Amino acid sequence: MEILIASLKHIKYCNVISQNIASSAKVRGTGIALRSPEYIQTKIENNNAVIAIENNEFAGFCYIEIWGHGKYVAHSGLIVSPKFRGKGLAKKIKTLTFNHSKNKYPNAKIFGITTGLPVMKINYELGYKPVTFSELTDDEAFWKGCSTCKNYDVLNRTRREMCLCTGMLYDPNKN
């Protein structure tokens, strides 16, 4: 299994990554923002993605987004193909994404929002702390990205104070 920072040679996996995100959202029935193959491609092109490959087969993925003029970065789209689940791959992908973020954006606060307990546990082990949404970026483009999530109405009704997701934050100045 290779887990590495995605490069242009991995563009060919964008469709399957997008499909895995969509099918996982449907199966879980929880909030996962959908991402197009084109969107995923931009993350790879900008050196802001981690991919797991085994024998030329897609196994997992996660990407980095920059918000608030570089004050924040978020890890999003963490997905493991069903065939490769239950083997600790998500933690390995998330750990490389986390370390890559700290190296590439050393002063940025790193955050994520999730409804998944396994991701919350991984984040906690990496040093993230649960926070209110007011401690996350106020960048409108980030919150617009939640619009494809089935729980977006909850976020809007509460004026972005609450959702079914849990916000988690790693602050390099406090860790």
Image: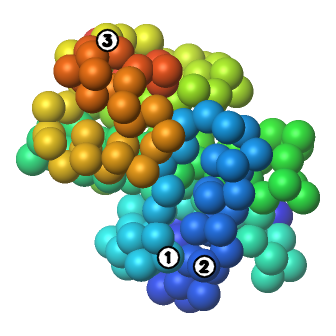
- CB-based contact (under 8 Å), mark 2 and mark 3: no
Can residue 115 be seen in this snapshot? Answer: yes
Viewer-side residue, 12 vs 71 = 12
Q: Quadrant of the C terminus?
A: top left
Tell me the crowding category of disc 1: few under 14, some 14 to 19, or many 20 or more residues within 10 angstroms, Cα based.
some
37 is higher (above) or lower (below) than 104: below
Tag 2: amino acid: Asn
2 is higher (above) or lower (below) than 129: below
Estimate the spatial distance between the alpha carbons at disc 2 and disc 1, rounded to whole Å: 5 Å
Q: Looking at this rendering, what residue extends furthest in the left direction?
A: 69
Can residue 93 be seen in this snapshot? Answer: no
Relative placement, left or right, of 154 versus 50 is left
Q: Which residue is mark 2?
A: 15
Q: Earlier in the sequence, mark 1 or mark 3?
A: 1
- CB-based contact (under 8 Å), mark 2 and mark 1: yes
Residue 154, given in percent of the width and then of the height, sits at: 38, 24
Residue 60, given in percent of the width and then of the height, sits at: 69, 59
The residue located at (59%, 48%) in the rendering is 78
Viewer-side residue, 150 vs 41 = 150
The residue located at (49%, 76%) in the rendering is 37
For the residue labelled by badge 1, is the local secondary structure a helix, a strand or a loop?
A: helix
Query: What mark, if any, has residue 132 been given in the picture?
Result: 3
Viewer-side residue, 7 vs 78 = 78
Q: Which residue is mark 1?
A: 37
Q: Quadrant of the N terminus?
A: bottom right
